[in-house]
Amino acid sequence: MKLLNYLRGTMPRPGLALSETVGLDLLACQPSLSGNWQAMLPDLSPIRAIFDEHLPRAADLAAGWDAGEVPTLPYFDLRQAQLLTPVILPSKIIAVGLNYRDHAAEQNKPLPPRPLLFAKASSCLQAPGLPIELPPELTKVDAEAELAVIIGKPGRAITREQAPAHIAGFTCMNDVSDREAQYTDKQFFRGKSIDTGGPCGPWLVTPDELPPLASGLAITCRWNDKLMQSSNTEQLIFPVDELISYISRNMTLLPGDIITTGTPGGVGVFRKPQVFLQPGDEVSITIEGIGTLSNPVRSRTG
């Protein structure tokens, strides 16, 4: 399944993608649902039942809309919808540095002996299609394509064998980075938490639609028409189950928590000459089996 949030009027609503064009509003199907993915992720069986009930209609609905019919609830046209981040205000975003072999190689660094963790403020999250906003004083801002894991079931001291049962799904994330703050501060929090600097989406894909632990997926990042990053999640130094186990030794993972697993080689700061985002750019991250997350880059005026 593809789980999503979208904007209906001024309110976020949980939904499902039945196809590339057909969305399903979950609260219109079942008003007794909480409407908050953090509450629904621990047990997706009711959502699966709704998905299975409505999936057979998707092809006919899409054909009808292409012929001029107007979508009516509980269905909506994904092409016309403003998608939001798959999780809204998670309790924490845990990021992993230097977790791709090719990213370590481009820095001439040895592989780390254990995961390098840092936090991103949840206020950095940005919806698919909405802008990455750059204040004029930030001139060395980079983009990083990342596979993100969304936690479904809470847990602490989770073993690697138990880890898959705690995964709700996977999505794309852009770990936008203010390199000047990152290197000046000699730690990552400020430089990795700029407002709008955490684009995430377009939806959460449940593990049954992907290879185990989302391994072996092609991952790319394009700035405009230029391919900046091209790798595969098999390049991860610490795979998803090991990350969940390592992180949960120290902290309880909660439904909706995001673990963003690191970026491949090819980022702008390690190119010669260096390349940084500019207003007018468009950043598109694609992960095989998940989809594409695209965001324009704009100047912030306020």
Image: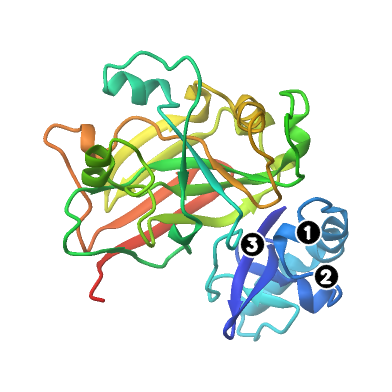
Question: In the figure, 17 relative to 107: above or below?
Answer: below
Q: Mark 1 points at which residue?
A: 40
Which residue is denoted by mark 2 in the rendering?
33
Q: What residue type is labelled 3?
A: Leu
For marks 1 and 3, give the one nearer the viewer: 1
**Secondary-structure class at tag 1:** helix
Q: Which of marks 2 and 1 is nearer the N terminus?
A: 2
Amino acid type shown at disc 1: Met
Q: Which of marks 2 and 3 is in front?
A: 2
Q: What element carries label 3?
A: strand
Q: In which quarter of the image is residue 4?
A: bottom right
Q: Where is residue 11 in the image (x, y as percent from the top left)?
A: 61, 80
Give the residue displayed 78% in from the left and 59% down from the top.
40
Where's residue 206, x and y in %?
70, 46
**Would residue 291 appear left or right of 190 to someone viewing this image?**
right
In the image, residue 169 sits, relative to residue 129, either above or below, namely: above
Mark 3 crowdedness (10 Å alpha carbons): few <14, some 14-19, many ≥20: many
Q: Hey, what amino acid is under mark 2?
A: Leu
**Label 2 or label 3, whichever comes before in sequence order:** 3
